[in-house]
Image: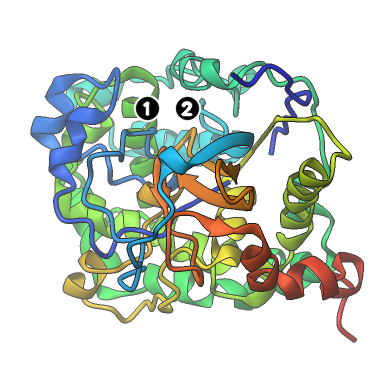
Amino acid sequence: MIGRFLAVTSILAGFLLVVTSGFDDRNAAVVEINGVNAAVANVISPLSFGTMTMYWDQRNAALDFAQSNTRVSNIQASDLDLLQIQQVSRHGSRFPTDNTMEEITNLLDKLQTNYSSVIPHWLRNYSLPYNMSVAGVLSSTGFEELAEYGKRTRISDPLLRFYDICDRYLSEVKHNPNASAELKAYGRSSQMNESIAYLKSRLNLPKSAILTATDTRAAFAACAFDIMVYGTPTQWCSIMDQAFLNRLDYAEDLEAFYEQGAGFKINYEMAAVLLQDIYTYMKNFTTGNTTIVGNLRFGHAETTIPLMTLLGYGDRTKLLSSWTDEQVDSRGFRTSVLSPTASNIDFRLYQGKTDKKYYVSVWIQEVEAPLPGCGSLYCELSKVEKLWGYYLNDYKFKTACKKQR
């Protein structure tokens, strides 16, 4: 039906979703992850790795989009003709970045140099199954995840890399040590100290061995990529239990919340430059100024999480380093749901068959999600324009991104 597509944009540099607080059964969804060794689900949940979580089918999961007041609309899908789809997606499963590889390598060197006689046998002669030549490159799984989205043809796009060119964000958040205060505090917390002690025990290290929170997160990442790239739980993941993963997963979410989510207003407001572009394509189609019916944009979690937060999706409750394990486990903000690899969001433009009005719906991870502030699955374009009014008409990216003096 849709035959005309704008050239697919790509970057090497997000998104997503509100859900999580109503996510009833994480283990039940494990079977929906394609390509993962079945043995993994019997040991740990593959949904425990923050943004390093593989894409999984959320269509049948119990999701809470925080829209409890969604009303039954008179408009149904059968009343509408689909005119245009715009999608923003995150890249698929990939190899670790160079920074992550370096942290895992440093941990490995520390263990093999100082504790080779006591660490598990598989680890004594272990070497990374990937090297710097593939740092950040899509794995074969990642290529498969994105095959249906088409080839990416452009390397860079300021609309998708707003986080790289917003000076105020770089100054106040990205390069500001104080912005990550909660993550650093969690790194010194009793939960993290217990996690470090647990990892030492599982590695057969003496209590006097020096392992840091960074080392512990590196081991966590090594497990995540063992599952993401190879689907195996028999190496790094074999020394971890679910309680350990839950705490490290929270550390990843703490970082994402304050660097990309609702932790700071600038994090998500700068995504308005992308929202403006998405809206422009919809509006231009309704006025006949474009015939583009498909616009696919590919980015990173740094792209998608801010945009979803801007739209009103996601739990904005501030994550704290002082939370208990019970509070951590019941939190609403989970990047493993919001932004697994290959996560995606659709903006779909429709026209009523009878009333000829234009409507918009939003789909997240292939799930139709009520647009916050609208209260129904299909929102009139005129109402969307009012809901997004400030960011469409008044927000100026260059002005907002100037460093504050």
Determine which residue is flagged by label 1: 228
- Residue 263 vs 80, above or below: the answer is below
| Residue occupying image coordinates x 32% and y 55% | 248
Q: Residue 348: percent from the left, percent from the top?
A: 58, 42
Three-letter code, disc 2: Ser
Asked whether the beta carbons under mark 1 and mark 2 sit within 8 Å of each other, the answer is yes
Res. 118 visible in picture: no
Q: Secondary structure at mark 2?
A: loop
Against 319, is 133 above or below?
above
Instruction: Work out whether residue 32 can be spotted.
Output: yes
- On the image, the x and y values in percent for residue 36 come to 26, 22
What is the quadrant of residue 61 in the picture? Answer: top left
Identify the residue position indicated by label 2 in the image.
93
How many residues crowd mark 1 within 10 Å: few (<14), some (14–19), many (20+)? many
Q: Crowding at label 2, few (<14), some or many (≥20) Cα neighbours within 10 Å? A: many
Instruction: Give the quadrant of the C terminus.
Output: bottom right
Front-lying residue, 65 or 17 = 65
Residue in view at x 68 percent, y 72 percent: 386
Residue in the image at 62% along x and 67% along y: 383
Q: Number of marks in the image?
A: 2
* Residue sitting at x 29%, y 53%: 209
